[in-house]
Amino acid sequence: MEFLTTKIYFYLGTLPVTKTVVSTWLVMGALIIASILATRHLKFIPGRWQNILEMFVEGIINMIEDMSPHNGKQLLPLVGALALFIGSANLAGLIPGLKAPTSDFNTTLALALVVFCAVPYYGVKNQGWKNYLKVYITPSPIMAPFHIISEVTRTFSLALRLFGNILGEEIVIAILFILSPLIVPVPMMLFAIFTGVIQAYIFTILTIVYLSAAIEKEDSAEG
Amino acid sequence: MISIDRSIIFQIINFVVLVMLLFRFLFKPVVKALDNRSQHIQDELSSIEKAQQKADETKKKYEEESKMIHQKYQEMVETANQEAAKIKSGIIDEAYREGEKIKQTHEEKARSEIQKIFSSLKTDIIDISTEMASKILSHSITPSIQDEIIDKMLDEAIIRIEAQMEVSHEQ
C-alpha cells in the first residue's frame, strides 16, 4: 500500500518533488511529444491519424459549444488540456512503476483550483466586472455568501470526486493484485480504463458547465 | 491519504504550463488547419455562388436582349408592312390615274377622229352630189338611166365611207 503515501524524491527550493510530480512530468512530456509529432505534418486532406486528432479537437469544441455557443475556441485550450491530462493521468496508473497523478489529492485539487480561477477569469473577460459580480447579489445581496460557498464547495467536490474514484480504483486493483496477482486484477484494470475515461469526461463536462455559466451569467440573470 | 502539501504549487504550475504547451503544439495548429479547411470550403462555395449569380445575370441579359431583338423585329415587320401597304396603294392610285389619262386621251382622239370622218363624209357627199348633179344635167337621162346612175353613185359613196371608217378604226 505504498501508493497511499506520497514519496518525496527531492526538494526544489522548498517545494517537494514527489512521485506524483514526477509522474505528472512524465505524462506531460508524453502528451507534448505526442502533440508535436501529431501536428508536425498537418495536411489539407487529412490522413487517418490527423482525422482522429481533428475528431478529438472538434469533439471538445462541439462539447463546449453545445453548452456555451460560440465559445468553443475560447475555452478549448483549458478544457482540451483538462480532458487530455486527466484521461492520460488516469490511465498512467495502469503502467507498472507509475503512479496516477490523479490519485493524489494535490493534483486533483490543483486542477480544481485552476478551474476555480478560470471561472471568474472567463466571466470577467466576457461580461465585465460589473455584470459578473452582479450575479453574486442576485436575487438579493444576502445570497452573496451562498454563491461564494457554492463555488468553493463545487471546487472541492470536483477535486474529491476525481481523487476518490481514481484512488479507490487503484486500491481495489492493488488489493486484488495482492490476493491473486495473475488473472483476477485484469478485468478490474480493464474497468479502470473505462472509469478513467469516464472520470476525465465528467471533470471536463463539469468544467464546461461552470465556465459556460460564468460566461453567460448576465443572460441568465436578465432572463 | 488526503493530505495537502506544497507539491500542489508544482501541480498548478505544471498544469498551467501544460495548458500553454498544448495550446502551442496541439490545439493551435489543429484549429488553424480546421479553420483553413473551412475557409477554403467557404471560399469555394462563395465562388460557386458568384459564378451562379453571374450566369443568372448573363442569362437574364441574354433573355432581355432576345426579347428586345424580337420586339425590334416585330416593329420592323410592322413598319415594312405599313410601307408596303402605302406603296401598294400608291401604285394602284398611279395606275388608276394613268388609266384615266389614257382613257381620256383615247376618247378625245376618237372624238376628233369621228369629227374628222364626219367632216370628210360631208365633203365626199357634197362632191358626189355635185358630180351626180353635173352628170344628170349633162345627159338626157331616162328614168331608168337616172336610177342606175343614182344607184352607182350611192354604192361608190358607201364604199368610200367604209374605207374612211376602216382607216380611222385602224388609227
Image (tube, coloured by chain):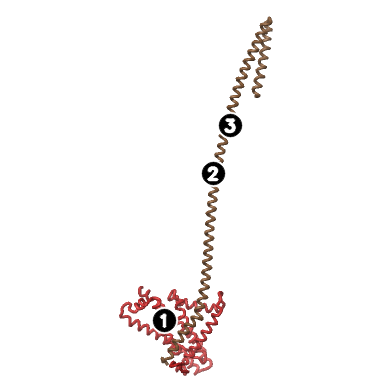
Question: Mark 3 = which residue?
Answer: B98
Chain B: colour as depicted: brown
* Chain letter for mark 2: B
Label 3 element class = helix
* Chain letter for mark 3: B
Label 2 element class = helix
Residue B120, by quadrant, is top right
- Amino acid type, label 1: Ala
* Chain letter for mark 1: A
Q: Is residue B84 above or below residue A23?
A: above
- Amino acid type, label 3: Glu
In contact (CB < 8 Å): disc 2 and disc 1: no
In the image, are marks 2 and 1 on the same chain?
Answer: no
Q: Position of residue B121 (x, y in %)?
A: 63, 16
Residue A118 has which mark? 1
Q: Position of residue A9 (x, y in %)?
A: 48, 94
Label 1 element class = helix
| Residue B58 in sight from this viewpoint | yes
Task: Determine the CA span between mark 3 and mark 1.
Answer: 113 Å
Q: Position of residue A33 (x, y in %)?
A: 53, 84
